[in-house]
Amino acid sequence: MSGRFTGRNEVAIVGYAQSPIERHSRLTLGALTIETCLQAIADAGLQPEQIDGFTTGSILPAAGGHGSVDGVDIVTANWVAETLGTHARWLCGFQGYGQLPGSVILATEAILAGSADYVLLHRALSNPRRGYHQNPMTSAAGGAQWVAPQGFWGAPSGIAFSYNEYLQRSDATRDDMADVVVGLRANGAEIPWSYWHGQPITVEDYMSARMIADPVCILDCDIPIDGAAAFVLTSAERAADLPNAPVYVSGFAQGNPTAASLGMAWSLDDVREGSARTAEMLWEHTGLTRDDIDHPQLYDGFSPFIWYWLEALGYCGPGEAAQFLRDDSSKRLDILHSGGALGNGRMHGVPQMLECYLQLSGRAGPRQLDGKRVGLACHSSANFGGVVVYSAERF
Amino acid sequence: MEGDSKPVPVVDAQSEGFWRATAEGRLAVQRCQDCGHFSHPPTTICNACHSVPPSLEFEPVSGRGTIGSWTVMRQAFLPGFAADLPFVLARVKVVEQEDVALIGRLVDGPTAAIELGAAVEVVFESLPGGAAVPAFRLVGARS
């Protein structure tokens, strides 16, 4: 069996919208999402009644002790379809991590199969008022019993384990990570809708930031926000009749779930083995190699993910990511060009996908880079998230 | 009062053997009686041999392990641990099977000299109601 994608470049993104990214929006998340979805549909040159497919990955925020009311804390595909009142032929939510690549994959396959002609893909993120990971639980049931009674909770604490192991096993230091985060914030500062617009930081700011779980400091974590983004996808054939330059889905890959997990306290070897498999599937699926990618946008919801993706995609060997970035600062700034989650706010993979779409469709405005034809958008860590390759041309 | 006490484990059908052992000061890990594979957290079917019907029992282990990694917690996402900050959490690989890891506090604390691969042994921290949570201490560390 071949892992090659037979639908390569047959589905395209044809429009988008991105809301302002704020700590707390003046709108409820549902209202913000509908406003953004309607903008994306109009941007694609379509009417709401033409949208016949809806998808998202709606999970999170989920770690804290707060509810998940649809239309308030989260927004599902069903809620959007119901609220817009259009006739949905296809409704599907992605479950699991790497929510954005996951929903792009669902949308692409629905269009290829003819289950929907125009799919609205949205992502809505909210910032709970009681603290994102804060949890007042006094009893720990299910998976929580293996971590919470021990004092372990929250994704930043989980990432600290593989990140610390990385530092211990290589010559990389927090000074190296400071350069990554400063670079992301510098790029994010240029983006009008970013929460961090106009707010770059210095290495000194990073090194003096509050520690959360050593070696993770507050600036290694993206800031929780209210925000929504939406994209419209359709077939390459239909895309030809729409106003914007299409950006094609060239292939994708997802990390496999691991059997036993304790929070996100992965071992570095587990990260590397799982990530290598994801990358291998991506090259098989797209028929491309790393050298064909001229705009890789790596995920950074936690800063060490940048290093993990650099290794996974073969830009450097194990333990060499910091050295790779030290040696090539111009390449680094392209990799971080979206500003990422650290430079925009916790939009969960949207900055990377949006950056690929804007650059490849020539719609990046003053941020437009020359000659970008094939982009790659990552989400989450390579061992359990996902990645999509986009192209400006059909090949 | 909500939020001020540490979370206690809610014992269920899969975890009962683990928590019964810790309450008695012993560490036990679920093991497949067909192929000998240890699983933690406990599972409903052996991840290695998938034998049906599953034959999974908790077996005593030595309580010895090595540090896979660690972190110093500086923020309490669980309010019951606020008074303990800063404290060390370790991911400990048990000697019986390297891919079996437990998370526990390292009682030596943040000033101890910790390194990857350092040997540890289990100790138990008591919770109200008779439950006990496994934690670890460095073996051979100066007190």
Image (cartoon, rainbow, N blue to C red):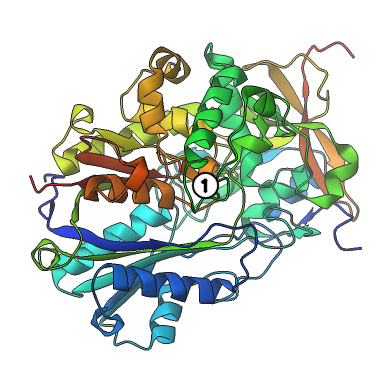
Query: Whole-percent x and y of residue A162?
Result: 56, 30
Query: Whole-percent x and y of residue A211?
Result: 73, 32
Classify 10 Å Cα crowding around label 1: few (below 14), some (14-19), many (20 and above). Answer: many
Query: Whole-percent x and y of residue B93?
Result: 60, 28
Q: Amino acid at mark 1?
A: Asn
Residue A70, relative to residue B108: is it above or below? below
Residue A387, relative to residue A177: is it above or below? below
Q: Chain ID for label 1?
A: A
- Which quadrant of the view contains residue B114? top right
- Which quadrant of the view contains residue B15? bottom right
Identify the residue under disc 1: A344
Q: A230 or B78, which is in the foreground?
A: A230
Residue at 32 percent across and 47 percent down: it is A364
Q: A52 or B142, which is in the foreground?
A: A52
Label 1, secondary structure: give it. Answer: helix
On screen, residue A114 versus residue A199, left or right, reads left
Residue A93 visible here: no
Residue at 38 percent across and 75 percent down: it is A38
Residue at 52 percent across and 50 percent down: it is A194
Residue B78, relative to residue A291: is it above or below? below
- Which quadrant of the view contains residue A79? bottom left
Q: Residue furthest front?
A: A366
